[in-house]
Image (spheres, rainbow, N blue to C red):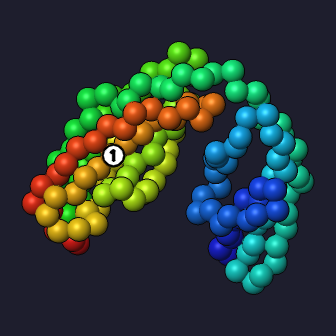
Amino acid sequence: MSKVTYAVNVNGSSTPVGTQSYVVFPLAPSSSHSISVTARDQWGNAATSNTLSIMTPAANNTSPPTSPPNFTGFEVANCEGWLSWSPSSDDVDPLSVIRYEAYVNGKFDFSAFGLTSTMIYATQNGTNTYTVVAFDSSGNRSQPSTVDIHNMWLC
């Protein structure tokens, strides 16, 4: 079986992706975009999908979601922070479209939709500060939820 890699092309910029699904964000309200996908096999053969032209809806939602509630964290094996929180709520969007961004010591680590737990490696010995922020579909950003996990070590 041959290995196939994918790249998502948005407005002429290509991003390699590790899966067959990908969420394109953030896209500004009331903006148009051209999106396609290129598949490439291990021998360099490539094929690009048809191009989708989309227009994002106008931003009619100006209030942010709530901060991720009940945010907790503890160390696992001295070098990983296990984080969990309850879903944020929003006055317009359902829980399934709330996107969360996670940071460790102020540096972005990952983003996902609907996720309410994750494991993130420590980036320094000692205390590591973990932060999660919620975003609604209009790009409104919640206040951050933060937890410090002490006595951690680099893996």
Query: Which is more toward the observer, 15 or 20?
Result: 15
Q: Whole-percent x and y of residue 20? A: 65, 55
Left or right position of 55 against 4: right
Quarter of the image for residue 125 reads: bottom left
Question: Of helix, strand and loop, which one carries label 1?
Answer: strand
Residue topped by disc 1: 131
What is the x, y in percent for residue 110? 45, 53
Q: In the picture provided, is 115 more to the left or to the right than 58?
A: left
Q: How would you rate the neighbour count of disc 1 (Cα within 10 Å): few for under 14, some for 14-19, many for 20 or more?
A: many
Q: Who's the residue at 36% across and 56% down the image?
A: 106
Quadrant housing the C terminus: bottom left
Question: Does 122 sit above or below residue 43?
Answer: above
How many numbered markers are drawn? 1
Q: Is residue 13 above or below residue 140?
A: below
Quadrant showing the N terminus: bottom right
Q: Residue at x 79, y 34 (%)?
A: 30
Quarter holding residue 127: bottom left
Position in image of residue 45 (x %, y %): 81, 78
On the rendered structure, is 80 left or right of 101? left
Rendered location of residue 58, percent (x, y): 76, 27
For the point 64% across and 46% down, the residue is: 25
Say which amino acid is labelled 1: Thr
Measured along the vertical axis of the image, is residue 37 above or below residue 141?
Answer: below
